[in-house]
Image (cartoon, rainbow, N blue to C red):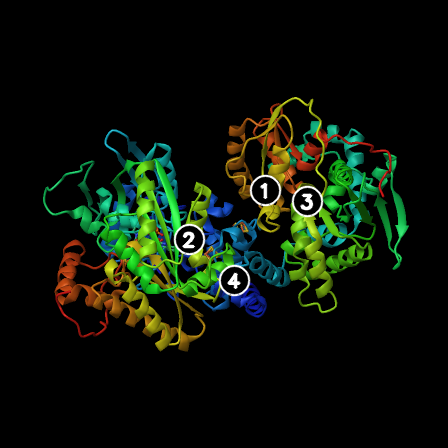
Amino acid sequence: MTAMINQSEALAERLKLTIDEDQLTNCMRCGFCQNACPTFIETGLEAASPRGRIALMKAVVDGLMYPDQSFQDQMDLCLGCRACEPACPSDVKYGQLIEQTREAIAHERSYSLPVRMARKTFLKGIFPHQGRMRMVGKTLRFYQRSGLQRVVRASGVMKLLPEHLQELEAVMPETSGDGLVERWKSLRLPARSEVTKSGESIFIVPPIGEKVARVGMFRGCIMDVMFIETNVNTVRLLRQAGFEVVIPESQACCGALHAHAGEMAEARTLAELNLHAFADADVDYVASNAGGCGAMLKEYDHLMQDDAAHRELAIQFSNQVKDVSELLSTIGRPLTMQEEIAPKTVTYQDSCHLRNVMRIQGQPRELMRALPGVELCELQGADTCCGSAGIYNMTQPEMSKNVLDRKMEHVKKTDAKYVVTSNPGCLLQMKWGIHRSGLNNEMEAVHLVDLLAEHVRFDAEASGAGK
Amino acid sequence: MLADTIRKQLTAIVGSNGFKDDTETLVSYSYDATPLLQAMPDGVIFPSSTEEVSAIIKVCAEHRIPVIGRGAGSNLCGGTIPMQGGLIIVMTRMNKLLEIDTDNLTATFQTGLNTKQFHQAVEAAGLFYPPDPSSMIICTMGGNIALGAGGLRGLKYGTTKDYVIGLEAVLADGSVLRTGGKLVKDVAGYDLTRLLVGSGGTLAILTEATVKLIPKPAYRRAMVAMYDDLHAAAKTVSSIIANRIIPCTLEFMDQPTLQVVEDYAQIGLPVHAKAMLAIEQDGDEGTVEHDLKLIEQICLQEGAIELKIAQSPEEGAKVMEARRSALAALSRLRPTTILEDATVPRSKIAEMVLEVQRVSEKYNVQICTFGHAGDGNLHPTAMTDARNSEEIHRVEQAFEEIFEAAVRLGGTITGEHGVGIVKAPYLEWKVGSTGIEMMKRIKQAFDPDNIMNPGKLFAETRKRMVMNEHR
Ligand SMILES: Cc1cc2nc3c(=O)[nH]c(=O)nc-3n(C[C@H](O)[C@H](O)[C@H](O)COP(=O)(O)OP(=O)(O)OC[C@H]3O[C@@H](n4cnc5c(N)ncnc54)[C@H](O)[C@@H]3O)c2cc1C
Ligand code: SF4
Ligand code: SF4
C-alpha cells in the first residue's frame, strides 16, 4: 500500500516537471472533442473522454488527486487515435499530453514480470532491429509453412489463449523473411545499389519515363514483414508515377510503438538513425504507406525539438514526409488505369493517424474514385478509430473489441466487396473484424496501394527506362 | 463523501454500473465549460428512466443531498458545478428519441438526447427544429431546455423557449410532474412549461420533453457586407429590421475579431474593414432573392464598402463557417477565453459595441466582439490567462462594467447562456429586488429544502449598483 502511494507520489512529481502546462491550460473544456472519441462513445464516461483525461492530468499537476492505478488505467485506455485533435477548436495538442503522461508512467511504473519481459522483448529487442524483425518473420513463416500452424489450430492449443489472441492469430497474413530489397531483386526488376559519400548503402529503383522527383521509401518494420507485397506495390506505383525510389539500408523502425508506450529515449534513438539514413540518401520526399509510421515520422520535428544537434535536420525531414496517396495524387504523374476490370463497391476506413496527424483524408478517396468501375461507398464513422491503435488490440482487448463491433455494424451497411485502409494495424484489425462477423466470404480487407496496383496499367515495367 | 447506507440505496436503484464515487469520477465531474470554476461532487449517478430519477431524488430529499442535473457539461455559466457538493445526475443514458409526430408536427424525446442527433433525425423527416446553439455537436436537448439556449437562427425563429410545449419533470420530493402536451393552444392554469424552461436545474430535473417542429425552408442564400465604420454596420442591422425584413441569420464581427479570424482561416477577409455582417435568408426562392436585393440596397445606403453574395450554397456555407470559427480563432490567441453574452435591444447594438471597446481600453484587457447582431445578442470575448490572477481580476471588473452597460441600455446580463453561478451576483441588476423576491418564492414553492442545484441563480453576495428599479 505505502509502496503504491510512494509510486503515485513520484509519478505526480514527475508529471509536474514534464507535462506541458500551456497545453493543459489551453484546453477550455468546451467538450467539442468528446463525440470524436471512441472510448467516450463506448462508455459515456467523462473520464474516458479527451476533456476528461486532460482534466485528470491537470488535477494531478494541481495536486487535486494522486495519479493512482485508476488514473494510469484511464491513460492506458486511450487509443491514441488522436481524433480529438482535429475536433478541438483551441488546437490543444492532446497527442503530446498523452505521450508525456505515458512517459512519466513508464518511468515510474513497476510492471508485472511478464509485462516487463514482453515490453523489453518487443520494444527494445525486436522492433528497433530490422534484422531481428525479419527473424521473427522467418520463424512465423516456418510456423505457417511447416503445417505447424494447421496442427496448432487443429489441436485446440489455441483455445488456451485469450479469445482475442486466437482470433488475431487466425487472420495473420503470411509473413515474409525477405525484405523489400531482396523481394525486388527476386522479381528481377530494374534497380541498382550504391554507397553514399558517408558510406551508407542505398538501393535505387529508377523511375519509368521522365523523373518527377527522388523519394526515399520508408519500408516500416511490420509492413516489411507482414505486408511485403504492399511494399513492392508501393514501389511499383511510385516509379510508374515518375518517382525515382531510394531505399536506404540503414533505416530503422519509426519508433511509434515506443513513443506511444512512453519509451521516449528509445524513440529518439530510432529517429536519429532515420534522420541520417534519409539525409544521406539525398531525397526530395520520404514516402510512407503506413499511416501510423508516417505520422510518427511527420512529428520528428516535435520529438527532436530539444536536441540541438538534430533539430534542423528533423524539421527538414518532417516537411519531406508524405503519404504515398499524397505523392500519387498531387505530385506524381497521373497513372493510367485498365478499363476492363469488373465493377465493384469499396469502402474506406481512415487510418486515424493518417487523418488526424498527417491530415490526409481526401487524397485516398480521390484515388479510389478515379478507378474505372469502382464505386466508393462512404463508411459511416470512417473517421472513428477501428480499435487497432498500434498494440492496443492486445493490451485492451475488451475496449478494442467493442469499438470494432460497432465499426463492423457500419461496414455491413456498405455492401462493399473491399474494405480499404492505409495502415497495417488497421488492415489487421479490419481482417479480424470481418472474421469476427463471419463475413469472410463476402468481403476482404485490402491496403489502398494493393487496390490501386490491381487497377493500374504498368507500362514498360521491366525496362529500366528512367532518366 | 456519502454515507455507506446512502451509497447502497443509490446503487440499488441504478445498479453498480450506474453509480460512481471514485476519485477519478469525482474529478471528472467537477467542471463544465465555464472557465475558472471547479468543485468536487460527492457522487455521480447515471439513471436510465424517469422512475430511477424519481427514486434517486427521493433518497436525496430524505438526506438533504444537493441534486445537480447534467447533460453534456457544455454550459458557460457554471450551471453544473457542485458548489456545495452533492450528487450529479448525468442524463445522457436517457437519450431516446421517442417520437416524431408528422401529423401534429411535434417531437418527443428523453432529455439526454444529443442536440445534433435530434436535428439530423428531424431533418431526415423533412422537418425543421430551428434552435441551433454553436455547441450542438455535444450539448443535450435537456441542457438546452434547462438554459433556454439560443443560436444563430434566433432572430427569425426564436430560441428554445419558443418551441418547448410539454415537459415531464421530477420535482424535489421525487414526484413526477407533466406539463403541456402536443398542443399549440393551452391556457389551463399557470404556464409551468415556460417556467421550467431556463430554470437551470434549480426547480426540477427534466426527463422528457415535447417540442414543436416547422416545415423545412426550401432555399437559403448568404451574403456578407463590409464596413469601415462600426456605426454603419450596426445601423444596417436596425434598418434591415425597420424595413420589415427578418433574415434567418444576421451576424456581426468587429475589426479585432476579423483580424484573428483571417489570421487563422485565411479566406481573404478584408482585415482593414472595421466590421463585417454575415447575413443569410431562407424560405422560398423568390422571397429569398427579393429580400437579399433589398438588404443589398440597405447595406449600400448605410455605407457598406463591399458586398459579396454567395454564388453557391458552398460559398454561403464558407461565410457562415468563418463566423462560426470566430470563437475557435480567438481561443487560439491566449490560453483562456472568457465569453459572455450581454444582450441589448437591437437598436442599441452600435452603442453597446462602443461600450465594450471603451471598457476594454479602460481595464487594458483584450476583448473582441462578435455575435448575433440581429437579435442584439453580442459575445464580448476576453482573451486572458487563468494563471495570471491580476489580469483575471481586471477581466472580471471589465465584464462587470459590460453587464452594467447592457442593463443601462435596456438589455440583459445574459441572452442565452443562463445565470448559473457566474452571473448570479448581477441578476438583481436586471430583474430588480421585486423580481428576485418573486423568484425566491417560486424556488421556495418548488424546492423548500433547497436541494435542487443550490448556489445557482441567487447569489450570496449581491453586487450594488444604483439603477432604476423598474427595469
Ligand atoms: C463553444 C461553445 C459554444 C456555445 N454556443 C452556444 C450558443 O450558440 N447558444 C447557446 O445558447 N449556448 C451556447 N453554449 C452554451 C451551452 O452549450 C448551452 O448552454 C447548452 O444548452 C448546454 O447544454 P448541456 O447539455 O451541455 O448542459 P449542461 O452544461 O450539462 O447543463 C446546463 C444546465 O442545465 C442543467 N441541466 C442539464 N440537464 C438537465 C436536465 N435534464 N434537467 C434539469 N436540469 C438540467 C444543469 O444543471 C445546468 O445548470 C456554448 C458553449 C460552448 C462551450
Ligand atoms: S475540444 Fe479541445 S479545448 Fe475543448 S475540451 Fe476538448 S481538448 Fe479541451
Ligand atoms: S486519442 Fe482517441 S481515444 Fe484518446 S482521447 Fe483522443 S479521441 Fe479519445
Q: Mark 3 points at which residue?
A: A290
How many angstroms separate mark 3 from mark 2 (CA)? Answer: 34 Å
* Secondary element at image label 4: loop
Contact (CB < 8 A) between labels 4 and 3?
no
Q: Nearer the viewer, mark 4 or mark 3?
A: 3
- Residue nearest the viewer, comparing B170 with B350: B350
Q: Is residue A335 left or right of residue B229?
A: right
Q: Where is residue B252 in the image (x, y as percent from the top left)?
A: 36, 57
Q: Is mark 2 within 8 Å of ligand 1?
A: no
- Tell me the CA gap for discs 1 and 4: 40 Å
Q: Name the residue under label 2.
A: B324
Q: Hey, which quadrant is residue B281 in on the image?
A: top left
Q: CA gap, disc 1 to disc 2?
A: 23 Å
Which residue is most to the left? B189
User: Residue at position x 69%, y 54% from top?
Assistant: A297
- Mark 1 or 4: the one toward you: 1
